Image (cartoon, helix red, strand yellow):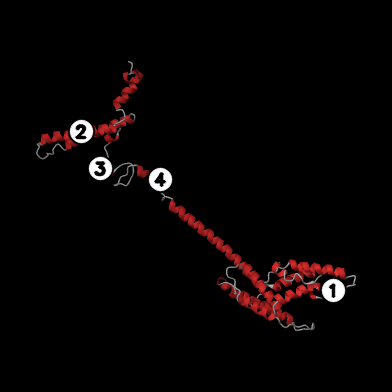
Amino acid sequence: NVFCGDDFDSWKRTFLRALSSKNKVGFVDGKVAQPEADSPLLPYWQRCNDLVASWILNSLHKDISGSVLYCNTAAEMWEELVERFGQSNKAKLFQVKKELSGISQGDSDIATYYTRAKKIWDEFAAVDDMPKCTCNKCECGINVGLMKYAQQQNMIHFLMGLNDSYTSVRGSLLMMNPLPSLSQTYSLLIQEERQRQVRNAGQFLSDTASSFTAGAGASKPPFQSSQRRTEGRRPFCDHCKKPGHTVDRCYKLHGYPTKQQQVKPKGSKYANNAWSLENQAEDSTQAVTQSSTLQLPGLDVDQSKQLLQFLANLQASKQSTQESHGHPTLQDSASVHMAGPFSEEASGTW
């Protein structure tokens, strides 16, 4: 990592660890002093010193590296960086404590929030002057107790920074006796977060399916049975509530026909049409006969009878013309079948 002037303690800790892996820490802390001018180890020391100095320069920003470029040794270069950017423990402790008191989850997930808090806890532990037993003969376990106390305080700060949606989980953790460790608390919160994500995903799919079904139902026309569709095309009687005829032909309203009227002459459908026309003519004649006793205003009985007979014949003629339009009559059909291709109308050259 290139040091740009911020967070010097983190860069310093990282760089010292890299030097330790190469066994070169003594060149920056002054423990490996420069040999005498006539010493045969001077060339080897100079080569290692230049190697460490080049590592320091390559890990600094160009504006900062230019200010330490003319230092003679790596130790001088390191000391100048510590004096310029290093803070006292008290100032660093104040800064870390302030960050720790204002940390909260916000829009971050549990993992990101824990990582950010863990970094501040480690910085606080590095600059904190907490007393420790150094006699190496302690039997009361004060160091272990202090470590547990620090972890408990970190867990309290971690729970305080959680969002309000974790209030119930936070209360359950604080009610546990003994209190769970920081690692156990993090594990439980991660499991709770994953369960909420699964529930939210299921609720989203359910809402989407409901919306889709509602939209499809709104665009689909209402269901109609085949019987109703059939009744819409066929005649329907409003009196007996049955399809197949209208109210003016309902037997229940006008009476059932006699046996003579029910017998239909044999033949094709044209014969049926002719039979229906004959029935209509008979009905008209019967209607005139029944109304023969009627006398219209301004006319005598004979004149009224003649007028009614004329109107009945006219109505029967119109109905016969409409029903037989486009269909041959019974006599025409019989003549065509009997004559066949030998008739004048069939051949045209007879």
Q: Where on the picture, by quarter, is residue 269?
A: top left
Under mark 4, the amino acid is Ser
Upstream in sequence: badge 1 or badge 3: 1
Disc 4 marks which residue? 226
Under mark 1, the amino acid is Gln
Q: Where on the picture, by quarter, is residue 176?
A: bottom right
Under mark 3, the amino acid is His
Whole-angstrom CA distance, mark 3 to mark 2, is 24 Å
Q: Which mark is residue 254?
A: 3
| Res 75 visible | yes
Residue 47 placed where, x, y %?
Answer: 83, 67
Q: Is residue 229 left or right of residue 55?
A: left
The answer to whether marks 3 and 2 mark residues whose Cβ atoms lie closer than 8 Å is no
**10 Å crowding of disc 2: few (<14), some (14-19), many (20+):** few
Upstream in sequence: badge 3 or badge 4: 4
Upstream in sequence: badge 1 or badge 2: 1
Whole-angstrom CA distance, mark 1 to mark 3, is 135 Å
Q: Is residue 235 left or right of residue 63?
A: left
Disc 2 marks which residue? 314
Residue 179 placed where, x, y %?
Answer: 65, 77
Upstream in sequence: badge 4 or badge 1: 1
Q: State the SS at label 4.
A: helix
Q: Is residue 241 left or right of residue 106?
A: left
Tag in front: 1 or 3? 1
Q: Where on the picture, by quarter, is residue 151?
A: bottom right
Disc 1 marks which residue? 34
**In the depicted view, which residue is nearer to us: 230 or 49?**
49
Q: Is residue 328 left or right of residue 120?
A: left
Q: Residue at x 32, y 18 (%)?
A: 344
The answer to whether marks 1 and 3 mark residues whose Cβ atoms lie closer than 8 Å is no
The answer to whether marks 4 and 1 mark residues whose Cβ atoms lie closer than 8 Å is no
